[in-house]
Image (cartoon, grey):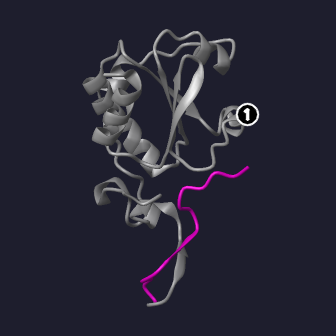
Amino acid sequence: MSIACGVGVPVRGAATGGSSVRSLSRRKECHGARVPTGGLSRLGQRPRRRSAAVLTQAATKETFASFDDLIAGSSVPVLVDFYATWCGPCQLLSNQVLPQLAANVGPDKVKLVKINTEKYPNIASKYKISALPTILLFKGGQQVDRIEGLPEASQLTDRLKYFLGA
């Protein structure tokens, strides 16, 4: 199984005037979502690191016997973000969208979980994750919603509130 995030996608308007293949580090979008120009390097330099927002400050690392135990044992809905460290839109989701979601919905209404698809390919395969980022919502131990790509914070909040019944 391979997960792609714009790597090696043909792009028009190369320096030679024709089509060429560019890597994600030179592209300005992935999965239709715009990536801020300041977040990507131009001449092979590494992207600037930004400090993590509210979500990562309040995050705790927990260990469970299995992913299924985490989903089934939760008293609140579980929002699972499937990501990879090299995926630009995944980083935007983690640093901008999820902190806004946590602030709008509240920590007692939903549990946010992040799954690195490179460290846990068996979980990604089980849920047929083929695009990044992918967000799954579990309620009562069952998957009730799936979002592929980078949603806006307001769209994700509205969708989550719908499933929460708020």
Q: Residue furthest bottom?
A: 17
Q: Nearer the viewer, residue 134 or 61?
A: 134
The residue under the point 36% across, 37% down is 156
Q: Nearer the viewer, residue 74 or 23?
A: 74
Question: Seen in the image, is 158 located left or right of residue 135?
Answer: left
Q: Measured along the vertical axis of the image, is residue 159 above or below residue 130?
A: above
> Does residue 35 appear in this view?
yes
The residue under the point 50% across, 49% down is 87
Secondary structure, mark 1, is helix
Question: Seen in the image, is 127 located left or right of residue 144?
Answer: right
Q: Nearer the viewer, residue 82 or 91?
A: 82
Q: Which residues are magenta?
A: 1-16
Q: Measured along the vertical axis of the image, is residue 160 above or below residue 1?
A: above
Question: Seen in the image, is 49 located left or right of residue 127?
Answer: left
Q: Position of residue 96 (x, y in %)?
A: 31, 39
Q: Position of residue 1 (x, y in %)?
A: 73, 49
68 part of magenta stretch:
no
Label 1 Cα crowd, 10 Å radius (few <14 / some 14-19 / many 20+): few
**Image quarter (top left, top right, bottom left or bottom right) of the C terminus:** top left
15 part of magenta stretch:
yes
Three-letter residue code for mark 1:
Asn
> Does residue 44 appear in this view?
no
The residue under the point 46% across, 81% down is 12
Q: Which residue position holds label 1?
A: 122
Q: Which quarter of the picture shows residue 165? A: top left
